[in-house]
Image (cartoon, rainbow, N blue to C red):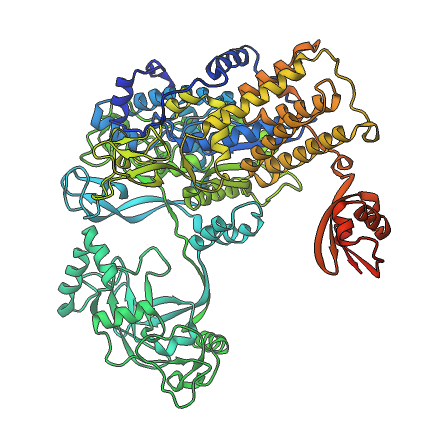
Amino acid sequence: MLRCQQLRPWSLRTSPSVRSTLHGNRLYASTTTTATKKAPIDFSSVEAKWKAKWAESPPFKGLETKDKPNYYVLSMFPYPSGMLHMGHVRVYTISDTLQRFRRMSGYNVLHPMGWDAFGLPAENAAIERGIHPAEWTVKNIGIMKEQMAMLSLDFDWSKEVTTCDPSYYKWTQYIFLEFFKAGLAYQKEAVVNWDPVDKTVLANEQVDHEGKSWRSGALVERKKLKQWFFKVTDFSEALLKDIDLLENWPERVKQMQRHWIGKSKGAEFEFPLATPTDNVSSLKVFTSRPDTIFGVQYLVVAPEHPLVNKGSLPQEHAKSVLDFVKGLEKKQNMEEAEESKKGVFTGLYVNHPLTKENIPIYVAPYVLAEYGTGAVMGVPAHDKRDWEFCHANNVVDEIKFVVEPSIKEVDKKLDYSEPFTAQGILTDLSGPYKGMKSKDAMKAVMRDASKIGFGHGATQYRLKDWLLSRQRYWGAPIPIVHCPECNVVPVPQEQLPVPLPLDVSLTGKGGSPLARAEEWVNCKCPKCNGPAKRETDTMDTFVDSSWYFMRYTDAQNTSLPFDPEKASARLPVDIYIGGVEHAILHLLYSRFFSKFLLKQGAYHAEPNTKPGNGEPFNILLTQGMVHGQTFKDPVTQRFLKPEEVDTTDPKNPKLVANGETPLISFEKMSKSKYNGVDPQTVVEQHGIDPVRLHILYKAPPSEVLEWEDTSIVGMQRWLAKVLKLAETVGNTTAKTTSIPALDKMSNEERDMYRETHITIKQVTEAMSTTYSLNTAISDLIKLSNYIHTSSVQASSPVYQHAVRSLVTMMAPVTPTLGEESWETISRNDEKKSSVFTQSWPTFEEKALEKDTIDCVIQVNGKTRLNITVPVGTTSDAATIEKLARDTPQGQKWLGDKPIRRAIVAKSGQLVNFVI
């Protein structure tokens, strides 16, 4: 049995040469621009100190209790490529910050991590480097776990899952069989990319822009294979309707999901063939515009339609049609055909029951066999694509406009040079429906079509069933046996997992590697005990990632994928953090799995839990990409390598070759642009806490972050300032006493107390509601500046409360400096404790109230001065008048002149004196 963990990993500390061998020649942008300056704090020493202490005594250990509410923070698990990039640093810093905040706020937090470890890259690496995919994967996981530890990320590693481990994919196979038993996993023929030289199936990413195999260079063909599908379309309506429950998802993600599901209401019409064939007597088509039924001038079927075969086609047309379809087997020809709208006439006709006309049938690649009925009606006058197809193939001489605009200009002829795609009024060509509005005509046409058996109302979805078969090795085997006597037989649960065989030759040639593993393929039928063969397809990696968040709730369970009670107590995920590139398929399939497993009783929904109806993720936070600083030659536009640019003066970079100024932009990080940034190098140069601060402060989480590290020094200085404030508290000999009542505080103390509680309120909202972590850091910086410039003494309980609150709120973002600062503050405390065992500070509403407000004074409608007035006098015009007259500016504009009228506005913030 193959078990990822059984393979001996490399030493986790790999030399640069080993990392180069693993990952190719990675060219990073320079991460330092000037000679390294001494940091204000020895960050590496502080980090080493606290990592050692955490290892000995984890700060969050033993804090879970049954009386606390649960909170599930999850970042999307990575593919173990062996190298973290800055996008990883950003997403994991966000999740780690939020989970630390929630723990300090009194929650039992689940914050797990795992590995999306199956997939094509490991298989390709095995072929190119002669290393087993499992060994490659385990080595990369080891390296990435060390990199994560470097970032001070606090994951619950007891919940770790690795999708290529049999202890995980056993349950992936179990869930597949649950779908199979429910009739939601089935086989049918589907088109694949076929390499005729290597005789193997290719993923889309293995086919280049010319339609050729990336390995053999052969022209890729389209070939039909029997493959496995999940019937996700059975959940179309639930998946669409419940998007409305996702109140805490970005609107653009919800729109992408709605579009992908693509619900259309309309009608289905059945056109009888003028000359029925042995296997087809009529063609069904769906339309969202039944009001245009009299404008149907041709039908188009998919190349894979049952009608497209030698026996059904007229002899004089069969060769041209079949040659056309055969030519579509070349991938690049298919794409060209779809662009050009080329099709071919089949020689066959259908009868239009309403017009009694014979309508030609065409074949074209833009019609998909797996979408709808595999046939569409062509209405060139009222559909842009149909218009273009009709002209490209000379389908008819005269196009029939059966709908015209509701409002027409007098004495102006209608424009027939382009299709009219809007609703309107039906023309004389629409027979009994002429003069009707489109909306009314749709209902009338469907009613009459239904009476004669020609059509009926219908709903269609763009969503297609999920093709999960992959003709590859490195994936979860599909737990099915094919028996000559019993046909398709599921593997019994007690025989799971169906393990991947170890002794498989990976060459990238000759079809599925599993098909060549004869000892593995040949087995006994679980039903009749006769000779049988295993299914040699493996599952799409989206299957693994569609339920991993559920396994985290009970990762060590050996009897079930997860205990129903444990999963129900944790699900749904409270906040899910990841890239927007997963906004469609991963999220859609996870929703599908979650709804299915709820329906099967694998877990239950707790009362009043949002979103409800088996939705897996309550809050979705889609973080933006990290772009790198990119340099180009101003003449050739060539991307420049780091060593070709002199960045000694970061504000004025120069080309080393000629001293010219390069073109500067921020673009997606890639090897070809030489703008990648190595997280390990950045952390070693600047310290992990300054890097964490910097990556959260530079941009809101959902927006693109333009990475440059020249301003990290500002984060270092701020941390030094906070540590210095902590020292002022730690050095004071005054014992901490209770905070006095507001009316017992001095004016300066009241202002500091207010500023502290305003910051607590704002930072708490940023951490729990808006997720504007950049503004939270900005608020903390403002508070530290306020404390630093205040005249309040360090011995004051108000001062100490402010610094303690500052350090506590800073800790989730900067764990090591948070601990160091807290230790410094607590120097004189009898009982020492971690900052992470402190309760998150709460704000007092009364403390937020101001004693005074700023008041704008106008004289005869013109602004003349500003004064400060006590809150209690904001509606007292006479008091405000006295305060204004007592100022030099008030004397200038009011003098001893009598006030004819005083107008108080904006709750006393504006007063207009009329003199």
* Whole-percent x, y for residue 80 in the image: 36, 27
* Whole-percent x, y for residue 734 in the image: 74, 13
Q: Is residue 849 visible?
A: yes
| Residue under the point 79% across and 54% down | 894
Vertical arrangement, residue 583 with respect to residue 696, above or below: below
User: In the rendered image, which quarter contains the C terminus?
Assistant: bottom right
Side of 822 where 477 appears, left or right:
left
| Residue under the point 83% across and 27% down | 744
**In the depicted view, which residue is nearer to us: 281 or 350?**
350
Occupied quadrant, residue 498? top left
Q: Is residue 60 visible?
A: no
* Whole-percent x, y for residue 230 in the image: 40, 45
Side of 676 where 106 appears, left or right:
right
Occupied quadrant, residue 766? top right
Side of 760 where 87 appears, left or right:
left
Number of marks in the rendered image: 0
**In the depicted view, which residue is nearer to us: 593 or 571?**
571
